Image (spheres, rainbow, N blue to C red):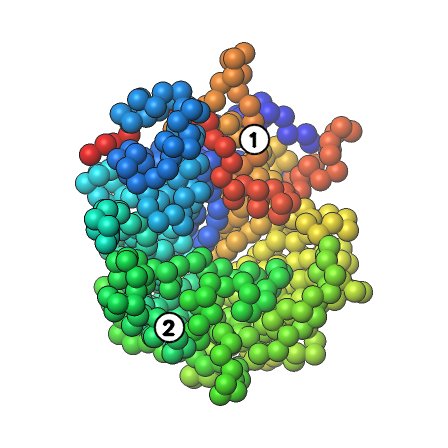
Amino acid sequence: MKRTQLAAAMLLATGSVSALAATYSVAPVPLQDNARNNFARSIDDAGNMLSMVQLEYNPPIDVEQLENDTTFFAQFSEALDSEDDVKQGVFSDNDYTLIVNFLLSNQNAVQGQKLSNFRTYITDTTDAELVPGLDQITDKFNDYTRSVESAGRDSLDGDFIVGDSSALVIKVPYENENGDVINYTYPESSQQAFVQVNGVTNTLPPVDTTVGGFASARAINDNLQVAGFSTVSFLDSVGEAAAECANDETRGDIPESRCLYGLYLGDFTVPRVEGFFRNNANLPSFVLASEVNATIWQLDVNGGVISTETFPLLFTPEEDDNSHYFTYAYDINNQGIAVGEALTGDAVSIARPGSSTIAESERVAVVFRDGETSEMLPRDENLLSEAISINDNNWVAGTVVRANGEIARPRLLAYNLDTTEQIVQEGFFTSSGVVANAINNNNIIVGKADIDPSSEAVRLTSAFMFDIATEELVDLNDLISCDSPYTLVEAVDINDNNEIIANARLKTVSKFVTGEDIIDDQGETSLVDSIVAVKLSPISNGSIDECEPDEDDLPNERQGASNGIIAALFLFGALVFRRRTAMRK
């Protein structure tokens, strides 16, 4: 059945999409008034969901910093509708567009206001509350600075939220040797793990805190054990560089803290195994100069750290080997068993779709328990593997990369730690890539799978669920109403009530940064592709809705958006903003 614009609008107005002829209802998380896009992160057993927003509306503008500490006016004076108005904090749509895009591209500049690209909210299907990470409320804006990228990753009944966060951007006035005052702005530390308890944020410290160290928290269990990873050692060169920063004669004509920032700057990201990764090439130099180990922090009821346990590498590097190696924990069950991935120290040649054979760092699925790091699978079975989630039945969900002919694609992995039973599942067709994201205690795995059998490197994907008992892979789009305006592209998490948080593609009205609709000269609005997080709830006694496509429907209309669309939505394009007034103090 073709989804008409009118039907979609009516369904959106209800706030929930359901039908008797469906087994799951769909409700968006209430963040569409906050941002253009929002992305699913997790759902706990109480139904609390974490979602990360992008293209957030109404970013604050510090006009004083814009005028005094950046080259904005020198670059864009002639392009502004009114330079005088901008300096008074009054912006036309065009001027506001220029300002925000300038600030977003100004992240690594020595001076000037910094705006983060992403922030996290905890929501149900009615309310949403910011998870600020290490951000703080300031007098300048009477609100958070929005300079901090907070990445909430897991929650326990909504009371404990764990994740990682960039640090607060600080402004440090410094008079140099020429007598000029420079207002340096930069994050005061590298990425840190955090736990938020009853609205209060505590840092979960790394084991080695040289120059602040580095850490990420990924999951929390009922016993308040938090699994993630952190720095456990650094090369001597890092300590030596920090000592030079502390020395007035060697650091140069800059503040000590700005010198230290030069050591830890850089964004941390390691792609899942379905994406290319080469150690010593994809990470910031600060991380490359460290060893990172899977870490479990034991918390008290107030979020304080009682103890910290780390898990070693899979191998012992040679004494003169200064390469970066890691073990990462991604999830932990209520028995305190954590799972994740580790580098082996070897390389493996992989021919991914759309590319020739390239050497990548070998990563393998591992389990962390009793102080040991253990490899889960024989290496000769897979090119790469990772364990991403574990339930209380000791079933592990993950992904393996295997070659189908000459081309390597990901496959779903289900593995039982007690029996060593292993299930490797292909997708909806022979060469369909499958990526697992989570497993619940009902032994149901969710994730995304290719639905487009083309030879393209980037394919259309659809959200799926996989029942270990039946070994059946189901497209979640087949379980919702035919008239749903949502196209489910990835299922991200599932709780023990079989409620799912997923990413969906949705046609939405193009908006200004204030959240108001953009109306053209003819009084019309335009629709754009957005990605939104949605909650899928089982319908009691529901049945599958059999959809009959119209002749003019596209073959994959009901199926997932391409990863290319999702990637494109992560980029801040040129936005059109309405006139507003900025705070100037």
- Residue at 32% x, 36% y: name it: 66
Residue 173 versus residue 128: which sits nearer the camera?
173
Under tag 1, what secondary structure? strand
Instruction: Give the number of the disc on residue 528.
Output: 1
Question: How many numbered marks have been drawn onto this rendered protein structure?
Answer: 2
Which amino acid does the dot numbered 2 rest on? Val
How packed is label 1: few (under 14 Cα within 10 Å), some, or many (20 or more)?
few
- Residue 139 drawn above or below residue 333: above
- The x, y position of residue 493, in whole percent, is 50, 55
Image disc number at residue 238: 2
Q: Residue furthest front?
A: 178
Residue mark closest to the camera, 1 vs 2: 2
Q: Distance between the Cα atoms at labels 1 and 2?
A: 47 Å
For residue 21, side relative to residue 255 (left or right): right
Q: Secondary structure at mark 2?
A: helix
Tell me the residue at 24%/66% (across/down): 248
Q: Residue drawn at (38%, 63%), measured in percent from left and top?
A: 264
In percent of width and height, residue 310 lies at: 39, 78
Q: Quadrant of the N terminus?
A: top right
For this rendering, which residue is in front, 311 or 221?
Answer: 311
Q: Quadrant of residue 45?
A: bottom left
